[in-house]
Image (tube, rainbow, N blue to C red):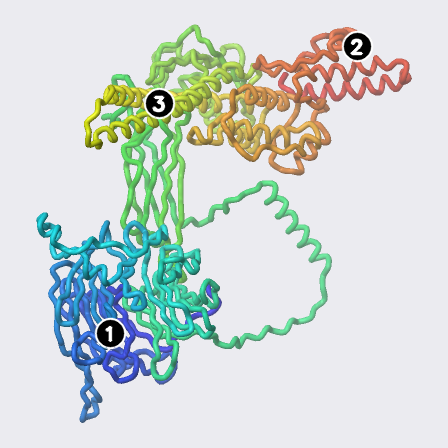
Amino acid sequence: MSLFKARDWWSTVLGEKEEFDQGCLCVADVDNSGQDKIIVGSYMGYLRIFNPRPVKPGDGVQAEDLLLEVQLREPVLQVEVGKFVSGTEGLHLAVLHCRRLCVYAVSETLGNVDHGNQYQIKLMYEHHLQRTACNMTYGPFGGVKGRDLICIQSMDGMLMLFEQESYAFGRFLPGFLLPGPLTYSSRTDSFITVSSSRQVESYKYQVLAFATDADGRQETVQQKLSSGKKLVVDWVLNIGEQALDICIVSFNQAVSSVFVLGERSLFCLKDNGQIRFMKKLDYSPSCFIPYCSVKEGTINTLVGNHSKMLYVYQDITLKWATQLPHVPVSVKVANLQGLKGVIVTLSDNGHLQCSYLGTDPSLFQAPRVESKEINYEEFNAEMKELQKIIKEATITQDILPQSEKHRDLIVTAEVSPDLDVESQAIDSEVKAEVVPSVTIKVTIQSKMTAQQPYLAVCIQAPLAVTCDRFTFNDLEPGSSETVVLSVFLKGNFPPSELEGNCVFSCNTPTELNPEGIPKVAQCKFKLPLRLVCFPAQPSKSANHKLTIDTNKPPISFLTIFPDFADPSEEDQANVLGFQFLTGSKITLLASKTSQRYRIQSDQLEDLWLITKELTLRLEEHFKKQNCKDFACTFSGSVPLQEYFELIDRHFELRLNAEKFQELLSERAIQFRAIERRLLTRFKDKTPAPLQHLDTLLEGTFREVIALADAAEENQANMFQAFTKLKSATHLVIMLISLWQKLNADQVAIMEATFLPLAEDTQELGWEETVDSAISFLLRTCLSKSSKEQALSLSSQLSMPKDTSRLKKNISLFCDRLAKGGRLSLSTEAATQQATVVPGGCATIPESDLEERAVVPGSTAVFSSHKHTAKQKSSPEIIFGKKCFFQGHSALDVCLISKAFSQKNDVSSAQRKSLLATKYSNLLLHESRSCF
């Protein structure tokens, strides 16, 4: 926002609900009295002429300021003042309508009474147009003296030229699509416009005069042969954007120039089309006008924008910025009542203002500061409180503002507890007999005015909704809107999540910004498990099994799964079967003697949804019983090997997609080369044999179609593999969190690390993104030393050659978590963890030749040959219990054996002290670890 506002000298509002545009404003001596007048035409057909005479700056319009107001029969597109009548050099008013051009004479009649002088207009002549007009320009075409000719551009690209009372000729612009701004340069005697191809084009008047007649587009061959020359452009400049307006500048102290206002740039061109200078604008302009500068060799330009700002440029240098009370669509510079340089602006709703640039003196004086004694203790307490707040904000690293207590926009989504009686599934690929659907009712409550409201319902594939986008009329304060939609399974594979999100966006107007400030509100909803699976017979055998431990007795499945279990069958209290709509089965078992639950299935990724649903329903069940110490744990091995197989499958499909893309590119190049040769043969005047080029073209075409079909099938398989990979990733994250008892923040870090992408693409894939994220954690919060933290990561992500590095980093990530590492994004926590390894665990070498440590559930082994002999003898020599060291790394065992290998260097007391220290560290590690 500008510091200064435009000083209001005179202003008024024209009519009611009238519309105005760029050509509706003109400033000229229309009555030949020697003083400028303001002429305004509107799309409602009103023509007004003003002569502002305020008593003091800022006064509103007086009755005598309006010289003339008349309603014409048609909308006014443009008004111009020039020498349009033959036999006189007086100025006349030209008014352009859609199908007419009228030239009026404005005259003043002296009054004999107190009412003053009267103004009236007289029609001198008019032209009825055969085509719909867009805009017009005027000037001494062809170098005529003492008169102005008029050129009108039609909506279909025809230039119609009028020599005052008579029609001269018409010419069509070549390659025309949409009309653009039009102006005339008297210095070069040419018309300049901007075509729809975003090019500034110049046409000589003489070329237009002798070109082919364009009174009709349909001409016979004889007419074309007997007519004039082809219309050729004089020069062309590609500016790369649409133009809003064009002005010709020819001042005495400045070089003749062509100014073009684009959508994001301001161009200044020479007469031959070369660029003198260009100014990139960081706003959206609405209008402009160049005017004479006091500095020789420079040109000043006024540029208005849609943010109600008016900028003053001297060539490309910004000299002044001022605030306007409206968005200008047209701006002029006038001399009114002896005041030079008055800025006249017109808005699209009829706000006409005459203003000048300047400032008002500031009358504000700073109040005197009362002297008082400084309480240093109070200041220190306040400083500590502020430092505490800053530290907490730094640790949490929140980048989004906290939600307001009293929300103005509330979005709620209510999921029906029962499935739809009649399924609403559309175009589902699932091969089941009936594809169920569930109804969701979304309610939007607004406590303020909401403009352009829009609701989007986001569901991840393979789930789909009957309608995912809704638009509403503007919401009034206290109003609400409700929509109903249905969700169903569209793809023939299980989803990775049973959640959705509703996002509502709108604009809320304020006093400072009537257009509105964008606001967004959202809510999440959870879909029922019955949407994707149904009860089935349990299966005794399975390839993948997981065991979840709890600290409470097992609960009957009849209680926690009432929507799947049949109360009449007692055996379902401990065994329950599920079957996805896609065909795969999952079995859930509850132990009768221990506090354990087992989930088993033939596919690893199918375990995720049932495992998550089991933990959520157990937590909800014990929460209803006011049991706060319920917890789930996992003591088995993390299925990393099966997880790595899913990663390899997804990466293989990505490699196939890359190969298909290369083959398609090669075949497309071959296809175009054959086409060029065939076209050359067909255009040749002397026929030549095709030499089986047509057969080769047909064969290449079939190859392109076959490759495209294969690439499309591979893309569908890759999306299905990515969904399975996400399900398995969710499962691995959950097992690691239960294994290491991670809190919510640490689980969020793991989810951001392993699930960074909502969609997988060839440019940015899952493998390289996850590998980079894990490498960052291994070098920060899970680093073994400060030297490792200093290592820099690659700033560019590219598709790797294989997945060996990724699988090694995942194994190392799990190993460091098993040895006491903790996830944190705080730099302080990462530094402390690097200096003092938690749990007394030793540092972990990254090299494959430094260590032999087996990650739970993984076949990845880090081999070491240094400590093998000591590792074999140490357990029985020291404690006589080999089982004590199960679960500890080789380095922890070697630390104790090292104490007994230094008999000649230290005393017996020192060896006992060292042994006691290492033993206590191992006990501490044993208490923290799950192994």
N-terminal of the pair, mark 1 or mark 3, is 1
Q: Which mark is residue 878?
A: 2
The residue at the point 72 percent across, 24 percent down is: 840
Is 501 on the left-hand or right-hand side of 38?
right
Residue 237, horizontal then vertical, whole percent = 35, 54
Look at the numbered disc 3 and give the secondary structure of its residue.
helix
Q: Quadrant of residue 141?
A: bottom left
Q: Amino acid at mark 3?
A: Ala
Horizontal relation, residue 833 to residue 92: left or right: right
How many other residues sit within 10 Å of disc 3, few (<14), some (14-19) or many (≥20)?
many
Q: Secondary structure at mark 2?
A: helix
For label 1, the residue is 81
Contact (Cβ within 8 Å) of mark 3 with mark 2:
no
Q: CA distance from mark 3 to mark 2?
A: 63 Å
Q: Is residue 652 left or right of residue 171?
A: right
Does residue 398 sit above or below 647 in this rendering?
Answer: below
Residue drawn where x is 62% and y is 20% of the image: 815
Check disc 3 and report the residue beneath it: 711
